[in-house]
Image (cartoon, grey):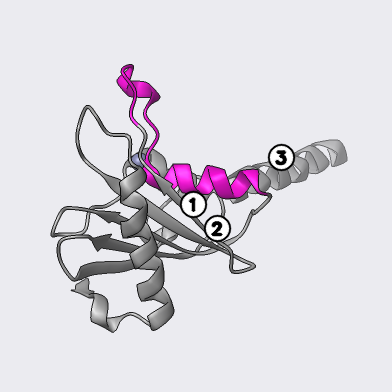
């Protein structure tokens, strides 16, 4: 599953570079663990994010959610790719909250990268969070509820 950055397309490499560059904007005075992210929106716009910690630790926001909320604020709702980078030589995987946040917007490519090695992991949002609870779960619930109500009316 781990491979080398050399296997990526030139475009994907450039997005990984942007994620690594975004690490400079981390505000991580408590952990010193810098994370950068770059998300490619459906129209091709690339938006970066970094992790921003807080003295109230629970208020911390991760880099990938930071990138996505910036993109969402600009009106984007569909994404093609997100690259996430840390200093760990083995690419680091997003936390549970971020996996949930990423999959809200469907299935798209995820590249986990390192600023200190050429190692990468290529996956997608569903690969990060199998059996996910998504907007489709709520749509299905609504549909099934309607069907049950209709069958009740017939009796
Ligand atoms: Zn996270």
Is the C-beta of the residue carrying label 3 under 8 Å from the nearest atom of ligand 1? no
Residue 134 in sight here: no
Q: Nearer the viewer, mark 1 or mark 3?
A: 1
Residue carrying label 1: 103
Residue that appears at 54% across and 42% down: 69
Q: Which is nearer the N-term, disc 1 or disc 3?
A: 1
* Residue 68 against residue 46 in the figure, above or below: above
Residue that appears at 34% across and 66% down: 17
Q: Residue 11 carries which label?
A: none
- The answer for how far apart the CA atoms under marks 1 and 3 are is 24 Å
Q: Is residue 108 left or right of residue 151?
A: left
- The answer for how far apart the CA atoms under marks 1 and 2 are is 5 Å
Residue 34 among those drawn in magenta: no
The furthest residue to the top: 56
Residue 67 among those drawn in magenta: yes
Which range of residues does the magenta coloring cover? 53-74
Residue 32 in sight here: yes
Tell me where residue 4 sits by quadrant: bottom left
Residue that appears at 33% across and 17% down: 56
Q: Which is the main secondary structure of the residues drawn in magenta?
A: helix
User: Of residues 100 and 69, which is closer to you in this image?
Assistant: 69
Q: Is residue 5 left or right of residue 49?
A: left
State yes or no: discs 1 and 2 in contact (Cβ < 8 Å): yes
Q: Quadrant of the N terminus?
A: bottom left
Q: In this view, does 120 lie to the left or right of 100?
A: left
Residue carrying label 3: 145
Q: Residues within 10 Å of mark 3 (few under 14, many from 20)?
A: few
Where residue 74 appears, x then y in whole percent?
A: 65, 48
Where residue 105 appears, x then y in whole percent?
A: 56, 53
State yes or no: discs 2 and 3 in contact (Cβ < 8 Å): no
Residue carrying label 2: 106
């Amino acid at each position: 599953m781990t491979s080398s950055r050399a296997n990526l397309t030139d475009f994907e490499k450039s997005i990984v570079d942007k994620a690594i560059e975004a690490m400079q904007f981390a505000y991580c005075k408590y952990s010193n663990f810098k994370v950068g992210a770059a998300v490619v929106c459906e129209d091709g716009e690339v938006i970066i994010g970094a992790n921003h910690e807080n003295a109230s630790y629970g208020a911390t926001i991760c880099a990938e959610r930071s990138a996505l909320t910036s993109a969402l604020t600009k009106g984007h709702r569909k994404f093609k790719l997100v690259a996430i980078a840390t200093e760990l030589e083995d690419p680091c995987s997003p936390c549970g909250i971020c996996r949930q946040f990423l999959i809200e917007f469907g299935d798209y490519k995820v590249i986990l990268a390192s600023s200190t090695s050429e190692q990468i992991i290529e996956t997608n949002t569903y690969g990060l969070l199998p059996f996910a609870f998504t907007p489709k779960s709520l749509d299905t619930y609504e549909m099934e509820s309607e069907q049950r109500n209709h069958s009740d009316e017939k009796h």
